[in-house]
Amino acid sequence: MKQQANQIRPGWVILDNGKQYTVIGIQILQPGKGGAFIQVEMRDVETGLKTQQRWRTVDTVEKLTAEDKDYQYLYAEGDDFVFMDQESYEQINISKDLLGERAPLLQDGMKVIISFIEGKAISVQLPKNATCTIAETEPVVKGQTATGSFKPAILDNGIRVMVPQFIDAGDAIVISTDDLAYIERAKK
């Protein structure tokens, strides 16, 4: 199905020059002169290689229709993750590479959506938010808590994020699974 390039979203599967690509990230750029264009970071479904492509926002791209199924994360097994189909209870192995930097966000029992094209898993969609615990962060410096400044922190899963000054080690926070950004302190 043809779509305008400015409609592309992460998780889409598109056909470009006869190859299938999963969209990882997008950035719409508006230069001072001329029309806007979209820069798309994508991964080749066959080889797993990352590439970038630019289109004018008025260009069209071929969006492939993928079959989405609900799965539940069970456990890690070597370089794969094991998921269970929520309807048939069949288990499948998915390579850690398919999740990329979001792989550490998987938690036991987490519900995900896996997209398939021609029976092959091409993307894993995590829930919008994940709750994680701060493993370590810098202590609060007196006087900095009044400003809206952020400090680096390391989560219990090893991911580095920027958090507000009032967050301490041991606190549970909610982060976005799309861009790994802090959202709020988790409710107790």
Image (cartoon, rainbow, N blue to C red):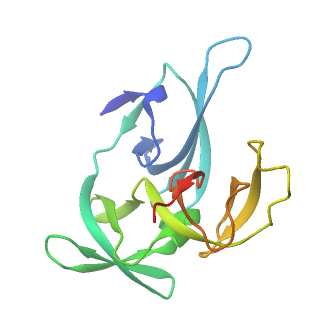
Is 66 displayed left or right of 163 in the figure? left
Tell me which residue sits at (34%, 63%) in the image: 112
Tell me which residue sits at (50%, 61%) in the image: 186
Tell me which residue sits at (48%, 66%) in the image: 98
Q: Hey, which residue is sitting farthest top in the picture? A: 33
Is 24 displayed left or right of 141 in the figure? left
Residue 86 occupies quadrant: bottom left
Q: Nearer the viewer, residue 155 or 124?
A: 155
Image quarter where the C terminus lies is bottom left
Residue 60 occupies quadrant: top left
Tell me which residue sits at (62%, 44%) in the image: 52
Q: Nearer the viewer, residue 153 or 147?
A: 147
Q: Nearer the viewer, residue 37 or 112?
A: 112
Residue 74 vertical position relative to residue 147 in the rendered view, above or below = below
Q: Position of residue 9 (x, y in %)?
A: 45, 39
Q: Position of residue 26 (x, y in %)?
A: 56, 39
Residue 82 vertical position relative to residue 110 in the rendered view, above or below = below
Tag count in the figure?
Answer: 0
Q: Position of residue 157 (x, y in %)?
A: 59, 75
Q: Position of residue 66 (x, y in %)?
A: 28, 51
Q: Hey, which residue is sitting farthest right in the picture? A: 142
Image quarter where the N terminus lies is top left
Residue 52 visible, this orientation: yes
Q: Hey, which residue is sitting farthest left in the picture? A: 88
Residue 36 vertical position relative to residue 134 in the rendered view, above or below = above
Residue 97 visible, this orientation: no
